[in-house]
Image (spheres, rainbow, N blue to C red):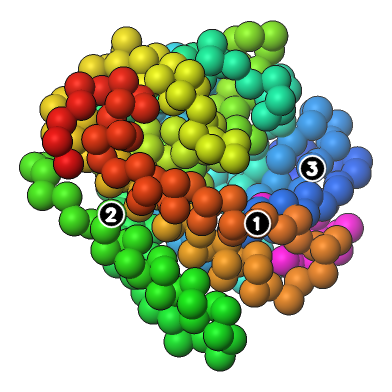
Amino acid sequence: MAVYTVFSDDELAEVARAFGLGLRTAKGIPHGSINTNFRLETEQGTFFLRHSTVRTREDLSFEAALLAHLVQGGFPAPTPMVTASGEPFLSIRGGLASIFRYLAGEELSRSALTAEHCERVGAELAKLHRLGNSFIGERRNPYGPATVRAWVSELRQHPEESIRSLGEELDGLLQHSQSSAGGLLPRGAIHADLFMDNVKWVADRISAVFDFEMACRDAFALDLAIALNAWCFSGGYDEQLCRAIVRGYQRERPLEVVEQESLFYQSLFGTVRYSASRIRDFHLSTLPPERLARKDYRTYLMRARALAKMGPSRFRALVRLACRPG
């Protein structure tokens, strides 16, 4: 989330009207790496506006249909607003605008995070996967191995020697992450970006899981690995948090043996994916600070190095899965 496209007051009011809202004020939100976002104060309450120039109509239709499926199943996902014609988006300024009602609750700070929180996150993610297993929509993962391999290749050819060096390191880590000879992994609709700032809480209860723009069909184990990396690392992997998120997940959806075997490799892939994207989208970005809140790629490079040093067996012990040689 960031401010890439500058909208006039009249354009923001036009978007709000298209979704049946009377705009009072709008404020840009300078976070993230792809979209332009605004907090809208309207006559009907507070809403969130997202403008994307890289998502297709098919992408946003998949997202809207998945959210409807999840909400129908009792999952705390947001419901997108629709225009008078029933579309969950509006074409404007070379992109697609979507509006969501602002969600109740507060984001959890890293300092306040406990094992109990992680266990609830794991359980909620498993519920999402159970519901996602019956969702029939199709969208391939736009950030799968082929995409990340292309990113890493670009970094290896960058004019700056320091970036080329990072590209070489990430290339080796990416190859390691793809070296598992495991069987076919269970797949379905996944969130694909379950970071701490994509979950809201009311007291110790999860009130909302949001930001499904990266949602796609892929391995459930990848989604768990992304969450584990996001929630359970602060200078190092926290054993209690790692075990809690996996324990919570398995309480609602036990991992198959092939998923347990692949979790290390999926976690390593996730660290390479976010390291590479943050170098491209934040470290090398020329946008000024007031229009982009940068994220440090080194936090994910630290995770990648920690996992590579740990190896599969120590990782399995860390998350308390039956340890095997490797």
Answer above or below: position of 139 versus 108.
below
Q: Position of residue 114 (x, y in %)?
A: 60, 16
Residue linked to disc 1: 296
Marks 1 and 3: in contact by CB < 8 Å? no
Q: Is residue 234 above or below residue 130?
A: below
> In terms of sequence position, does the residue under pointer 3 or pointer 1 come before the other?
3
Q: CA distance from mark 1 to mark 2?
A: 22 Å
Judging from the image, what secondary structure is the residue with disc 1 in?
loop
Horizontal side of 156 relative to 199 (left or right) equals left
Residue 184 position (above or below residue 95) = above
Q: Position of residue 21 (x, y in %)?
A: 77, 38
Label count reads 3
Query: What residue type is disc 1 on?
Result: Asp
Residue 109: x %, y % from top left = 71, 28
Residue at 10% x, 49% y: name it.
Answer: 181
Give 111 or 219, whichever is nearer the viewer.
Answer: 111
Which labelled disc corresponds to residue 39? 3
Label 3 to label 1, Cα distance in Å? 25 Å
Badge 3: residue crowd in 10 Å (few <14, some 14–19, many ≥20) = some
Seen from the viewer's position, the closer of residues 226 and 127 is 226
**What residue range appears in magenta?**
1-12
Residue depicted at x 41% and y 69%: 169
- Nearer to the camera, 120 or 116: 116
Residue 297 left/right relative to 266? right
Q: Which mark is residue 197?
A: none
Q: Residues within 10 Å of mark 1 (few under 14, many from 20)?
A: few
- Image quarter of the C terminus: top left
Q: Quadrant for residue 128, please give it.
A: top left
Tag 3: amino acid: Arg
Name the N-terminal-most of marks 1 and 2.
Answer: 2
Q: Which mark is residue 177?
A: 2
